[in-house]
Image (cartoon, grey):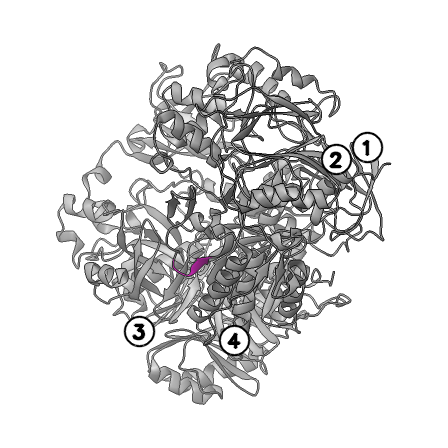
Amino acid sequence: MPEIARRPALPAPGEPFPGVAVTLAPLPAAARFVLRGDLAAVAAAGNAFGVALPSRINTASTLGARSALMLGPDEWLLVADDTSAPDATWALVRALESALGTVPHSLVDVSHRQTAIRVEGHEAALTLNAAVPLDLCEEAFPVGMATRTICEKAEIVLWRTGPRAFRVEVWRSFAPYVMDLLSAVSQENVPD
Amino acid sequence: MLLIRCPYCQTDRPELEFRYGGEAHVSRAQDPSSVPDAAWAEFLYMRTNPKGFHVERWRHTHGCGRFFNAVRHTVTDRFLATYRAGEPKPDLEALAREAAR
Amino acid sequence: MTVSFRTASGGRIDRDRTIRFTFDGTAYRGHPGDTLASALLANGVRLMGRSFKYHRPRGVLAAGAEEPNALVSVDRGGGRWTPNLRATQVELHEGLVATSQNRWPSLSHDVGELNDVVPPGVFSAGFYYKTFMQPASAWANLYEPFIRRAAGLGQAPSQADPDHYTHRYAFCDVLVVGAGAAGLAAALAAAQAGARVILCDEQAECGGGLLGERDAVIDGVPASDWAASTLATLSGDKRVTLLPRTQCFGAYAQNFFGLVQRLTDHLPHPDPRMPRERLWKVRARQVVLATGAIERPLVFPENDRPGVMLAGAARAYVNRYGAKPGDRAVVFTACDSGYAAAHDLTAAGIVVSAIVDLRPGPDGPVAATARGAGLDVRSNAVVTGVEGRLGVRAAMVATIAGNGLVGPSERISCDLVLMAGGWTPAVHLHSQMRGKLRFDAEREMYVPAAPVEGSRSAGACNGTFGIAEALAEGFSAGADAARAAGREWSERDWSPVVSGEIVPDGGFHGAVPHDRDVQKVKAFVDFQNDVTEKDIRLAVREGFRSIEHVKRYTTNGMATDQGKTSNMNGLAIAAGSLGKPIPEVGLTTFRAPYTPVTFGAFAGHSRGDLFDPIRRTPTHDWARAQGAVFEDVGMWKRAWYIPRGGETMHAAVLRECRTVRETGGLFDASTLGKIEVVGPDAAEFLNRLYTNPWTKLETGRCRYGLMLNEAGFVMDDGVVGRLAPDRFHVTTTTGGAPRVLAHMEDYLQTEFPELRVWLTSTTEQWAVIAVQGPNARAVLQPLVADIDMAREAMPHMSVREGTICGVPARLFRVSFTGELGFEVNVPAEYGQAVWEAIWAESQKHGFCAYGTEAMHVLRAEKGYIIVGQETDGTVTPSDLGLDWAIGKAKPDFVGKRSLARPDMLKPDRKQLVGLLTVDPAVVLEEGAQITAEASPVKGTAALGHVTSAYESAALGRSIAMALVAGGRSRLGETLYVPMPNAAIAVTVVEPVFLDREGSRLDA
């Protein structure tokens, strides 16, 4: 059997551009699941996953390497940054399914569907706002907010993980576009 | 670009995140096979197309993904209300009176 | 080069530094702070352009965005060529290269000026419509090319724009448009209230009219110093964004504004990383419009000669730029602001020979002061003409007698004639926001009636002209806006003390009286489009009543300046001719953009590789390394064919098809849409969304699913596999994936919300490798650990979960080629490695990799349809011969009721058939029409059209599929496909060309 290597959707980042006030970096592989269901499913999944699922739409909760993002009234994106190997991912699916039991729900593995980009630095919001049509000031988009939106012509999930840090979740084939677009923007904000 | 209040997200969001879905409250018959041809054609193709307040469907496609309904003025683009799918059609005249105040 | 037209001192230019620039190849010098227009004036250059139609020599009229005459092209090198820039807005920088436009061979000797001396009437209003009508063919061949050469603007750039442009979404509590007195005060108040403020101004320096005031003092400090200190305060506030060089060009619904910021045009050597312009898309809770007012010219004969300019512009040139537009001036005024200009010009050392005040006496205090200062003030007087073609030499001045007749003219030598016709509030943005206007009859001006919700107008754009009043109104507007945006702040009013200003009072609309022959003189209303008073009167005489029609017939206000200086005068002349008051004639519509915006700014980063996302599959790099040629399918790049050793496409596709049928091939099917349908009601949901029945489909089995829209027409198809009682793996067409998911969500959320089922897109979760051909099983078997792939254990149309090459996989036994086939689904990031492993194994059996073109041929040989190729939104399952895919026992599914409508049952509907050309070597053209006769009578309707046509390697001939009226009843008939040279004879056959029994599939 030949070696089966994983090829991430985004190559490793090149040298950061000098004088650029924002860092763009692809994040390592993670396990991701879309969970759909009602409150009973939410409670059961939270226990098994290791972080209580948020009940307020467009917010995220994080405990250690596990995060849950509520993206719709009955939709959560579960992200396990500590899990990427197929066996471990499969084990997590089994744990979740076993906790959910007969509670009506849908749990779908989307680990490879999307990838993540870290956008960090004091011009992070400014850089994103070249393409993201949401108000990213902290009053309007506080730390812990996470929502689907658009980045110019690609759909993304935008998640604020710190005052100057965002995580962009994007489908794999759109990831180079989002990365290239944000890179282009990040390099142009030079002082005049 | 319009701002549209998503009744699920409970915030105003940019139009770019939404898709228009045509006139609202055009309900599909429980048993379509019992609907006469003319009535079925009416259901498929005929819409009110008013100049003024229009009750219409939108979907927060690039947001929470939910379909909802809105009352929008087709001339001014002003939204009087948005509400969740399944909720009853609001009293347009009352809404317009309230908006005029 | 002479610099004799610089003032001795003063102005906001940096006299210690010199800038070199060229205009039409001649070198000049200027200073930082100059515009091209001010620097040219300071160098004694008056002639800056030629008019659009008559090619008349023109000088600069204004000092700002409203300039209609001095349009120039700027060459920034390396293909950076921008035509039609207003010289009044081009900032001077070292090495600037500017050229004039619309002249040949040169600005001072322009052959096109002959247009100006052709007999009266030839170029009058509507001349296009009257002159160039016959013969019709001459328009495209003769008239249009001639007109385009003779009349026009600058040359378009000849190369792709090497600059880049960017966008930014921005949000604020209060947007203030315009940084003059009112705007600065508004921003100050809003900022003090703690609001997030954006203040934009189109000029390089914020301050607006305050920068051109000589004597005005605000609360004890000179006006320009007040502006500077206010700007310093604002720039120290983190919540304030100051945007000079930024034009707010458009106002859109719900306080959304388009702003374009010029970032590099003013820099001699900009950092190449910098974008040239940034388009700001601003959402403001509240907006304060402080866009000022535009001075009106006076309409009198020869009012367009170089050296005739707006009085306020002359003030700005003298006070702000230290540039003297002339040595000896006559001021023609209907407004007190003309006197302010006279004083400032006098102070700058320009001789003011006369102030010609159109208004009857007795004089007000402003005139008295002027007389006291020794100026020659004439009341009830007019300028009746101007001498000088390339520059003013004299003005003809006359007095209006008591009977209204104009007396004899006196010639006054001068090289400058100023026009002060009063001020028109710049209500453009208010109007774009659908704000109503009110005609202030006393002051004869349109002002905003009531503010639009979320907005306020302040200062001159609101008809409030005095500096003190504008400051107070602006401050109050800023405070109110901040409060309306939710910032608590109690302070509301500010009453600044202002001295030393002359408040512009008075004004005039329309054409002034004169004693000249109206047929022989030209008194210009619209300078850029060469519309004269006479043209507008003619339009009315010819029956045009609506101002919108007069505008279009005369082209008044339709140039790139959109009539900023001409609309009100044109309106007044039309109203006078119609014998109606101005408000009864109405206004033309104000439209965005306020000034022209570059295409680059709108495009932003959306060009080249970033024009659209380029979606690549997980195995793209492998295909590229193999030399694959890609085709665009939506945003996807798909391998089209994979040529070997210099093969043509034709040869490659034939080889790929042959190889698949003989042994097998690998195909990248990753772009197929995939939707995971999960929940207790999943089967019931699919029952309602697809024509097929799903309840009895066993776990581990697949079915071809056909999806209709509610009208009964085919919208998508794909294989659906059941992974568990409550879990289906649905596939869609590549292009249909988002549409199908949205369609499913629509019905689930709005029609069937009671169903407990959820939909998740998994298109990008899985890489899909199609392994097709007689040896497909042999290739895959060694790589599959835990799936029994035997013929009986895993029959055609089944699905298994297991492990392939050590990674979790979903293995489908499906075929779109008619051969034994499998589709291997593995998590996307393993896709390429698994592909390589399968490829290596397949080489033992001589497999090829095949592309989308071969896939199309292989499926057509089997008569498999492609939605979007065999269908076009008007095709039913029955039309395609797919009645077998309809679950007739189901009470309902989306589209079912519509299939029973009478129109859907007609026997002459277009039906899918196969076509075989009588000559097997001829391949039909897709889209070609089909007729019953070889040479149908003109007007005969086609029977249908060819949907697919290929050369088939397996059959050794061409094949085609087509939609033909009543096609299934025409089997065996000969029909024709008329082509430009001759009609091609075809025979109608069943649309399955190969292995009708399906024995290869079941291998």
The residue where tag 1 is placed is C25
Chain assignment, label 1: C
Residue C129, image x, y percentages: 46, 18
Using the image, determine if residue A32 lies above or below residue C772.
below
Disc 2 vs disc 4: which is toward the camera?
2
The residue where tag 2 is placed is C327
Using the image, determine if residue C81 lies above or below residue C755.
above
Tally of numbered tags: 4
Q: Are marks 4 and 1 in contact (CB under 8 Å)?
A: no
Q: What is the residue that sits farthest to the right in this orientation?
A: C1
Chain assignment, label 4: A
Secondary structure at badge 4 equals: strand
Is B79 left, or right, of C423 in this rendering? left
* Residue B33 within the magenta-colored segment of the rendering: no
Quadrant of the image occupied by residue B28:
bottom left
Q: CA distance from mark 4 to mark 1?
A: 65 Å
Q: CA distance from mark 2 to mark 4?
A: 78 Å
Q: Which mark is residue A161?
A: none
Do the residues marked 3 and 2 share a common chain? yes
Viewer-proximal residue among C484 and A50: C484
